[in-house]
Amino acid sequence: MTERAQPSRKRGGRRAKRLVVVLVVLAGLLVAADFGVAAFAEHTVSQKAREQLGLTEDPSVTIHGFPFTTQAISGEYDHITVSAQGVPAGDVLRDLAIRAELRNVTAPLSDLTSGNTDNINIGDLEGQITLKASDIAQVSPLNNIQDLRIDPSTESYVRNGEGNDDSQSGSGGSGDDGATESQQEDEDDSTAGVRLSGKVQIAGEEVEIFAFAMIELDGTTIRITPHRLQFGNDRETTVVPQEVQQALLPNFEADINAGDLPFTVTPTAIRVDPGSLTISGEARNVTFAGVSSGQ
């Protein structure tokens, strides 16, 4: 009896192993199929966004959550991320970076498979649009400034030159414009302090100059208002005489029309980072087609 039982146990063990292998393979196939369907849906949305944003390449689209198939069948998605680089807007801005977090999205599976994104409804949209210094330098009259650079500052330093001691702790340069304080003071607000620097021609000589300005959201317009100037560089600066400041300040004053930007997000917050300016806002109950085209 013992000799007969041993082969029986061996055969049972082999069957169990085969069953485990089959289940693992099946699970792998289901996961692969789920990712394949998700990739197809992401590609469809990406292609439509490319057309409506006028891009040369497909933007990145990520549909979060697993499994994707259950979301596709129900037509309801918790979270989709769309991001793109090199987005043009208007006649001047040519290199915007866009990121949007779409939540509570309704998209019928039949529309996705047919490539129809017009009926994709977005419950909540959080959008960010980043303008690089190279783009901002094309806006008149800032295009008169050579090698325009952008860095964060604080409102107190912009207006009064105050806050030197606090700013020493983390600006990454001389520290006298208070970058760390700026992040705490101006984050998620409709105003922000900024240091604009570059080279201008004065009496036939090329001079490096710093302009300390406030950036404010006025409706859909980003308004740059300079308050004071300094000559010099990151190591040493000189206060500019008032009569010279009055003559040069208009060179740093500019309006950027945010109404021309993609995504129908009403700007509510503005942030300055080294080399860039980011505006952000939210929208509710919009369609993917309207969001992408900026209409």
Image (tube, rainbow, N blue to C red):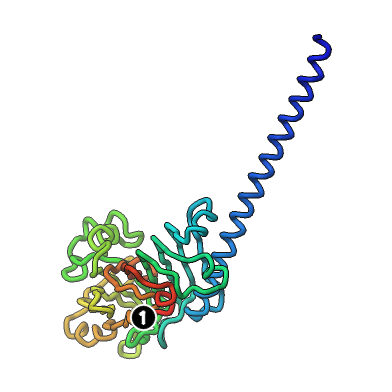
Locate the N terminus by quadrant. Answer: top right
Q: Residue type at mark 1: give it.
A: Lys
Of residues 142 and 108, the one nearer the viewer is: 108
Label 1's element? strand
Q: Quadrant of residue 105?
A: bottom left
Q: Position of residue 284 (x, y in %)?
A: 32, 68
Residue at the limit of the structure toward the bottom, as seen here: 204
Locate the C terminus by quadrant. Answer: bottom left
The reply to whether residue 233 is in sight is: yes
**Does 36 sit left or right of 126 as displayed?**
right
Which residue lies under the disc numbered 1?
199
The reply to whether residue 213 is in sight is: no
Q: How many marks?
A: 1
Q: Position of residue 262 (x, y in %)?
A: 40, 77
Of residues 275 and 84, the one nearer the viewer is: 84
Residue at the limit of the structure toward the top, as seen here: 1
Crowd band around label 1 with a 10 angstrom C-alpha radius: few (<14), some (14–19), many (20+): some
Residue at point 34% right, 84% down? 142
Q: Measured along the vertical axis of the image, is residue 42 above or below residue 213?
A: above
Of residues 261 and 10, the one nearer the viewer is: 10
**Does 14 sit left or right of 75 as displayed?**
right
Q: Measured along the vertical axis of the image, is residue 101 above or below residue 117?
A: above
Q: Position of residue 241 (x, y in %)?
A: 19, 80
Q: Position of residue 205 (x, y in %)?
A: 35, 86
Residue at point 54% right, 68% down? 110
